[in-house]
Amino acid sequence: MQQLMTFVANNPFMSGLWIVLLLALIIVTIRSTMQGIKQLQAQQAIIWTNREDGIFVDIRSADEYRKGHVSGAKSLPQQQIKDKKVHAIEKFKDAPIVLVCNTGHTAISVAKSLQEQGFNQVAVLAGGMNAWRNDKLPIATGK
């Protein structure tokens, strides 16, 4: 404990930064829990979509999608979803939909928007494409 106090006294900037980052992480976690949006790990998402004929929807830009996406994922940029231009996934209103962004944070607000538009089973890929890559799961490129 004495070493911690010495470190804090000698490094006030780094200690303050650590506290700010910890609070930000806590706030993000609480917000996502309160919004009622499921966050699924990659393996859970695969099982959930396969079991009930669901789909992965990549909400990143078309350029990011082309560079690498979940195999079989449909590209539907987040702005189209927020503008209620969801014709491409309309037939999945009652099927599992897993939204994919880079880190999993952007997809939470988009998931809420889809729920408001009548989509019943919406979840977010926890950690987004970064987690998918880290898990060394298959990535498709191109359109």
Image (spheres, rainbow, N blue to C red):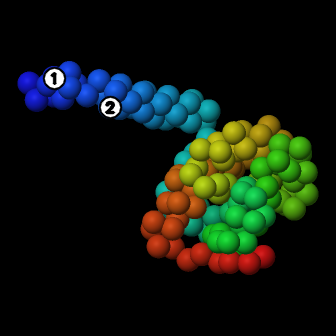
Residue 14 - label:
2
Image height of 51 relative to 40, above or below: below
Residue 109: where, in percent of width, then height? Answer: 69, 39
Name the amino acid, label 2: Met
- Residue 46 in percent (x, y) is at 57, 66
- Mark nearest the camera among 1 and 2 is 2
**Mark 2 burial class by Cα count in 10 Å: few <14, some 14-19, many 20+:** few
Visible in this render: residue 56? Answer: yes
Please name the residue shown 57% across and 61% down the image: 129
For the residues labelled 1 and 2, the Cα–Cα distance comes to 13 Å
- Is residue 127 shown left or right of residue 141? left
Image quadrant for the C terminus? bottom right
- Under circle 1, the secondary element is helix
Circle 1 residue: 5
Q: Residue 44 at what x, y percent from top left?
A: 51, 60
Observer-nearest residue: 109 or 116? 109
Query: Residue 26's spot in the image, x, y percent?
Result: 44, 30
Q: Residue furthest left?
A: 2
Nearer-the-camera pick, 139 or 7:
7
Q: Judge whether 9 appears above or below 49 on screen.
A: above
Residue 40 in view (yes/no): no
Amino acid on which the number 1 mark rests in the picture: Met
Q: Is residue 128 left or right of residue 3?
A: right
Find out whether the residues at labels 1 and 2 contact each other: C-beta distance under 8 Å: no
Looking at the image, which is closer to me, 39 or 75?
Answer: 75
Q: Residue at x 59, y 44 (%)?
A: 105
Instruction: Please say if 24 is above or below 98.
Output: above
Question: From the viewer's perspective, is 43 left or right of 70?
Answer: left
First reached walking from the N terminus: tag 1 or tag 2? 1
